[in-house]
């Protein structure tokens, strides 16, 4: 198994430079491809289906609490749909 390159903490290479180096490795590319299946659908569902595309409150703490509420309601909706599907079977 190949190891993805680690970031050197002494170098301030945030963003594209580090990402490009990681994506050049086979493991880094494979891990990034899984992002489509794990992370992106949640944001797509939140933005498109639930029409939540911006925070309503100002400030970092307020935005964090609002995001937690959005995530909690997303998870509750998933639990509800799974339980109703299981009850129907």
Image (tube, rainbow, N blue to C red):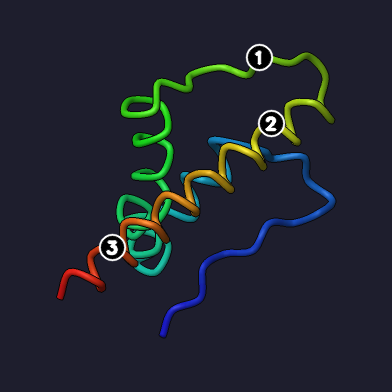
Question: In what element is the residue under mark 3?
Answer: helix
Query: Where is residue 89 shown, x and y percent of the image?
Result: 15, 76
Residue picked out by circle 3: 84
Q: In the displayed structure, would residue 78 be above or below residue 27? A: above
Looking at the image, the residue that sits furthest to the left is 89
Give the mark, 1 or 2, whose residue is nearer the N terminus. Answer: 1
Q: Is residue 54 visible to us here?
A: yes
Asked whether the residues under the numbered discs 1 and 2 touch, taking CB atoms below 8 Å apart as contact, a structural biologist would say yes
Residue picked out by circle 2: 66
Q: Nearer the viewer, mark 1 or mark 3?
A: 3
Residue picked out by circle 1: 56
Residue sitting nearer the eye, 6 or 61: 61
**Could you give the CA–CA distance between mark 1 and mark 3, rounded to whole angstroms?**
31 Å
Please name the residue shown 48% across and 19% down the image.
53
Q: Residues within 10 Å of mark 3 (few under 14, many from 20)?
A: few
Give the mark, 2 or 3, whose residue is nearer the N terminus. Answer: 2
Q: Is residue 7 left or right of residue 83?
A: right
Place residue 88 in its image quadrant.
bottom left
Please name the residue shown 53% across and 44% down the image.
73
């Amino acid at each position: 198994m190949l190891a993805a390159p680690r970031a050197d903490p002494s170098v301030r290479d945030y963003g594209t430079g580090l990402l490009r180096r990681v994506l050049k490795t086979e493991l880094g590319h494979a891990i990034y491809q899984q992002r489509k299946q794990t992370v992106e659908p949640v944001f797509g569902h939140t933005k498109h289906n639930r029409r939540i595309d911006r925070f309503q409150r100002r400030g970092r703490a307020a935005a964090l609490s609002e995001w937690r509420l959005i995530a909690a309601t997303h998870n509750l909706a998933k639990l509800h749909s799974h339980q109703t599907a299981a009850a129907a079977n």
